Amino acid sequence: MKKYESIRIFKNPILESFTHVHPIVPLVLWAPFIGFLIYRSYFELGYTHLQMILCAVSGLIIWTLTEYLLHRFVFHLKPIGPLSERFVFLFHGLHHDDPNDPTRLVMPPVPAILIMGLIWLFFSLFIPAFYMPGFMAFFTIGYLCYDYIHYATHHFKMSGKVGRYLKKFHLQHHFRHEKAKYGVSSPLWDYVFRTVTGPKED
């Protein structure tokens, strides 16, 4: 990876180092987790093929909705004070200030694990325990797809109609209107919630 002059966040070099993540890290972190969940689903819980397909479809679709909601309502939260302003900047504002920083395009492991843990707890309130491993396996696959599609939109040409469309869609969010086009791995929910184009301004 070429040397890149990143925006410095922390004076402490140890804290600063935790804000930089090589793009291979999410795959190394989450692939074993996904493998374990799929193994547990098939060989310990005895999922049928139909049950696994249902978990795959629901997990991937719910991921795209989660991605959209987090991006729109958490990462673009309107700050109400210095603490929330700092939170928004650290989680997403920095990315908009410097969108092509190659070491700040994927989520650092510590917050990623914390967020995924909270998401697991949230979904366990609604989804039967039997289906949670299969559902979360494909939900996490959706997250990995998001991470690498996001990285690709900033650092690769992305050939093919779908690739070019996703790249253009995301870059328009950055450079045309931040209050539109929140989906990265899928534009589905932008069409559902009518945020493909931003609100009209005076």
Image (tube, rainbow, N blue to C red):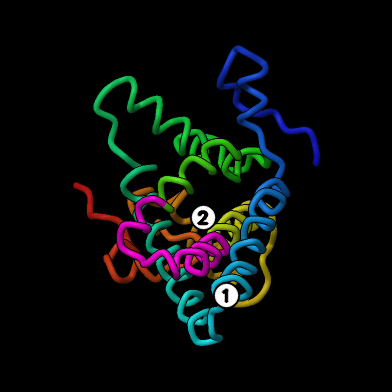
Quarter of the rendering occupied by the N terminus: top right
Which one is nearer the viewer's eye here, 30 or 170?
Answer: 30
Q: First in sequence, mark 1 or 2: give its number.
A: 1
Q: Amino acid at mark 2?
A: Leu
Position of residue 44 measured from the top left corner of the image (x, y, whole percent): 59, 70
- The residue located at (40%, 29%) in the rendering is 87
What distance separates the C-alpha of mark 1 from that of mark 2? 14 Å
Residue 63 is drawn in which quadrant? bottom left
Does 131 appear in magenta?
Answer: yes
Over which residues does the magenta segment extend? Answer: 121-142
Query: Is 193 displayed left or right of 62 in the figure?
Result: left
Q: Verify CB contact (< 8 Å) between mark 1 and mark 2.
A: no
Judged from the image, the secondary structure of the residue bearing numbered disc 2 is helix
Residue at the outermost top position: 11
**Residue that badge 1 annotates:** 162
Whether residue 15 is situated above or below residue 48 in the rendered picture: above
**What type of secondary structure mainly makes up the magenta span?**
helix
Query: Is 6 displayed left or right of 172 in the figure?
Result: right
Position of residue 60 measured from the top left corner of the image (x, y, whole percent): 48, 70
Does 9 appear in magenta?
Answer: no
Whether residue 161 is situated above or below residue 33 in the rendered picture: below
- The residue located at (67%, 16%) in the rendering is 13
Position of residue 3 measured from the top left corner of the image (x, y, whole percent): 78, 33
- Residue 171: mark in rendering: 2
Q: Amino acid at mark 1?
A: Val
Position of residue 19 measured from the top left corner of the image (x, y, whole percent): 61, 30
Whether residue 103 is situated above or below residue 18 in the rendered picture: below
- The residue located at (60%, 12%) in the rendering is 11
